[in-house]
Image (cartoon, rainbow, N blue to C red):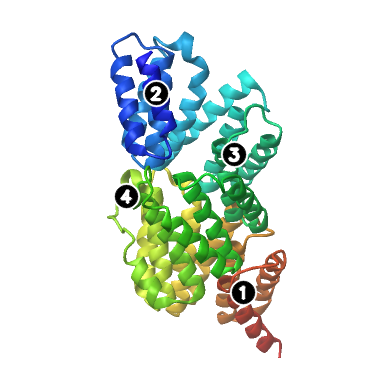
């Protein structure tokens, strides 16, 4: 009875006061471990994992999940079998955080398959599992188009799901669906989802989830060129960093990544250089943090290229490509590979190495067609524009014009698009007019 009370107190404080939640969960676990493992132990471990994942303590969250899974598969199997899919889902999310992407995909697929078999398509657990599985496929580029289909099915399933009424479950689906659709190239659909989610959470107060929604909505607004609105959301997210239950260092870095993209989009080179210098650039062996490490490397490389430090950008891109090519998780790093090939190709072009630049940018364009929406992605259009510029240097205007036409068609699908995308297309089309004359 006392353990149950402590667990409920922990759940009550889970998002509002991390220290209190941890205190009560720890007291509950001390009692429950004196008895044979059962459902109360498993559910308390699940709450510990959820709380620590939100706060950023991935090691403690992982330990709790693994202990709970072991109990579910052993002495607590009869009483806790229905909790196993949620635990697999958390294992998958934690494996993503730690960079073990093949293990993450396996765990997320297991979670969805068990819930789908037990509960059908329209149960909230099945829907959230599907969203998380789709997220991994889009994030890594392993099968982006398939991932978008799964995310769309999850978002549709959310409307008719059983048990999906609270904000946390809405966040678990729409919080994946919105940013992933936007990164795939469907900016408007992604922003609509984030604005819907922001409205759902408007009275929730400061929390890690609410902060993340504001940050992700800001990232989409940067792509659309709505810079002032993006900055306002980033300021609101930053104001939440001092709230209880939020690990400031983790979430501040996440905000700064979007802030850097905003500064680069606005052409604020000095500020971008200063902020980029704060991002961690670890050694060649990125270990379990390979996904986040590559993200920071790409931002540093983009910043270097934008500020005229071509050699630095080229060196970072080439070293990062070597890391990706040597990684056992290379099939899960396709999005990162595309970005670095694009940066490396642009750097080669800036160094007047047109032949080498063409090869690198052609690879970036081909990968872009696999990881982005081929009809709507401004990131793919950016690669097409860069390749077309090189082809003009190589006296191949017909090929360049064909790529410019594709990029123009992509841009035309967006009512609002940032200058970081529009200006390079205008420059390319101006050169093509000169060639036509």
> For the point 61% across and 64% down, which residue is it?
378
Q: Nearer the viewer, mark 2 or mark 3?
A: 2
> For the point 51% across and 24% down, which residue is it?
85
Q: Nearer the viewer, mark 2 or mark 4?
A: 2
Q: Distance between the residues labelled 3 and 4?
A: 33 Å
Disc on res. 170:
3
Which residue is situated farthest in the bottom direction here?
437
Residue 22 drawn at (x, y percent):
33, 32
Label 1: element kind = helix
Q: Nearer the viewer, mark 3 or mark 4?
A: 3
Going from the N terminus, do you reach mark 3 or mark 1 first? 3
Whether 51 is drawn above or below 242: the answer is above
The 10 Å Cα crowd at callout 1, few under 14, some 14 to 19, many 20 or more, is some
Q: Which of marks 3 and 1 is in front?
A: 3
> For the point 52% across and 54% down, which residue is it?
214
The residue under label 1 is 422
The 10 Å Cα crowd at callout 4, few under 14, some 14 to 19, many 20 or more, is some
Q: Are marks 1 and 2 in contact (CB under 8 Å)?
A: no
Q: Which of marks 4 and 1 is in front?
A: 1
Whether 317 is drawn above or below 370: the answer is below
Q: Are marks 2 and 3 in contact (CB under 8 Å)?
A: no
Residue 294 drawn at (x, y percent):
39, 55
Whether 241 is drawn above or below 6: the answer is below
Q: Distance between the residues labelled 2 and 4?
A: 37 Å
The residue under label 4 is 286
């Amino acid at each position: 009875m006392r353990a149950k009370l402590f667990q409920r107190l922990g759940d009550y404080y889970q998002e509002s006061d991390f220290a209190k939640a941890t205190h009560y969960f720890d007291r509950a676990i001390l009692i429950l471990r004196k008895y044979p493992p059962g459902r109360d132990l498993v559910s308390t471990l699940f709450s510990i994992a959820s709380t620590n994942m939100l706060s950023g303590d991935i090691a403690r969250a992982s330990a709790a999940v693994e202990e709970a899974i072991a109990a579910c598969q052993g002495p607590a199997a009869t009483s806790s079998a229905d909790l196993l899919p949620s635990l697999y889902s958390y294992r998958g999310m934690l494996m993503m955080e730690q960079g073990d992407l093949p293990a993450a995909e396996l765990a997320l697929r297991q979670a969805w398959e068990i819930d789908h078999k037990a509960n059908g398509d329209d149960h909230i657990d099945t829907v959230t599992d599907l969203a998380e599985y789709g997220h991994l496929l889009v994030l890594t580029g392993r099968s982006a188009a398939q991932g978008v289909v799964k995310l769309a099915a999850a978002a549709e399933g959310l409307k008719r799901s059983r048990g999906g009424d609270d904000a946390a479950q809405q966040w678990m689906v729409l919080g994946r669906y919105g940013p992933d659709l936007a990164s795939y190239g469907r900016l408007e659909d992604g922003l609509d989802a984030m604005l819907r989610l922001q409205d759902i959470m408007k009275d929730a107060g400061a929390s890690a989830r609410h902060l993340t929604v504001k940050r992700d909505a800001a990232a989409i607004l940067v792509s659309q060129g709505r810079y002032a609105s993006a900055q306002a959301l980033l300021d609101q997210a930053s104001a939440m960093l001092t709230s209880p239950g939020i690990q400031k260092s983790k979430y501040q870095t996440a905000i700064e990544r979007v802030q850097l993209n905003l500064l680069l989009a606005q052409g604020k080179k000095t500020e971008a250089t200063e902020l980029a210098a704060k991002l961690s650039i670890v050694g060649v062996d990125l270990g379990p943090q390979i996904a986040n490490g590559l993200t920071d490397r790409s931002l540093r490389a983009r910043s270097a290229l934008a500020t005229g430090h071509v050699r630095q950008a080229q060196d970072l891109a080439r070293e990062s490509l070597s890391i990706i090519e040597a990684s056992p998780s290379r099939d899960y790093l396709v999005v990162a590979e595309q970005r670095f090939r694009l940066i490396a190709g642009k750097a080669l072009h800036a160094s007047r190495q047109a032949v080498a630049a063409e090869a690198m940018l052609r690879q970036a364009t081909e990968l872009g067609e696999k990881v982005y929406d081929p009809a709507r992605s401004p990131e793919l259009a950016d690669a097409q524009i860069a390749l077309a510029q090189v082809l003009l240097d190589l006296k191949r205007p017909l090929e360049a014009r064909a790529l410019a036409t594709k990029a123009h068609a992509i841009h035309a699908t967006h009512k609002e698009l940032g200058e970081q995308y529009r200006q390079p297309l205008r420059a390319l089309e101006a050169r093509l007019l000169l060639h036509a004359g």
